[in-house]
Amino acid sequence: MRIGNLAGRLVIQVGDEGVVDVEWASGGLFPADPQGVYDRWDELVGWMAAAELPEGQPFEPDELGAPAPRPRQVFGLALNYRDHAAETGAPLPEEPSVFTKFPSAVTGPYGEIELPDDGNVDWEVELVVVMGRGGRHIPHDEAWDRIAGVTVGQDISDRRRQFAGSMPQFSLAKSSPGFAPMGPWLVTPDELDDPDDLALGCSVNGETMQQSRTSQLVFPVPALVERLSAVVPLLPGDVIFTGTPAGVGGTRQPPRYLRPGDELVSHIEGVGEMRHRLIAPH
Ligand code: ZN
């Protein structure tokens, strides 16, 4: 199942180019709000399995928003790919290195992202996990059952702000408006041959910057869910940015950052592609 947020309404992708509005097709059984459905995720999966959906309607891709537009918690993982840890000169973490992205940074899979004044803004393509049932103390072998699905994300990061204080401040540096784009679809794990081994990458103005596979994660998705939920409850609709592979701009020689007019394209195999234009501060 592939679900989306079309202009603020929950839709299911049907065929290659159509969508069905879930509130309408379910006769009001499910609400239109895309964030609300995660509280009733297992019910939605059950309904979908039995539903006879009508033909999909054409839609405007530009109207797709984030599949989880208002998560209560957004987790980020630092240094969770071996090659990315190596390029920063940091040792591999023995425990997951966790920060938060503030939920006001969430935006959709297409459109413009405003650069901050005097920032050094970098790209980080990431597999994003959205929790379904969630819970506390989730064992790793149950993790995928508690996850609604995965989507494409960018953990946009202002390196200047990240290292400007007396200690690194990941959360603020990664939370300007638009710094947590995700989409275009939330894809359930059963749609993927192996949800723990997906090709991902991104390009700037057509030049490939990052190219890896999620099988290279230091802490794979089931381990992250187990370790995070050992400390905090994972709530339905919560979002986990699982970390970025090598190829960010800040560790290049010379460093390279996003500029007004740049086009950032991010993709994950079997999930989809996001496309953003960076613009100058207003
Ligand atoms: Zn990241």
Image (spheres, rainbow, N blue to C red):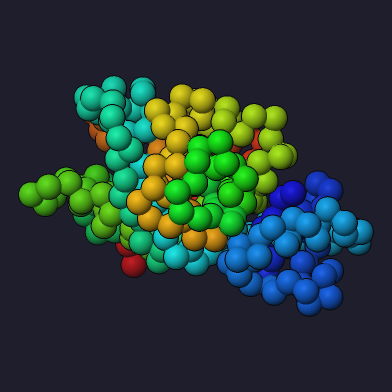
Q: In this rendering, would 100 be left or right of 74?
A: left
**Can the viewer see residue 113?**
no
Residue at point 58% right, 48% down?
147
Give the quadrant of residue 24: bottom right
Q: Position of residue 86 (x, y in %)?
A: 29, 22
Q: In this rendering, would 12 be left or right of 206?
A: right
**Can the viewer see residue 83?**
yes
Q: Position of residue 228 (x, y in %)?
A: 39, 47
Q: Residue extending furthest left? A: 166
Q: Position of residue 106 (x, y in %)?
A: 46, 60
Q: Residue extending furthest bottom? A: 28
Numbered disc total: 0
Q: Position of residue 40 (x, y in %)?
A: 66, 65
Quadrant where the C terminus lies? bottom left
Residue at point 67% right, 46% down?
188
Between residue 152 and residue 177, name the one nearer to us. 152
Give the quadrant of residue 73: bottom left
Q: In this rendering, would 27 be left or right of 259?
A: right
Residue at point 78% right, 57% down?
46
Between residue 60 and residue 3, name the one nearer to us. 3
Q: Is residue 37 above or below residue 245?
A: below
Residue at point 66% right, 60% down?
41
Q: In this rendering, would 252 be left or right of 261?
A: left
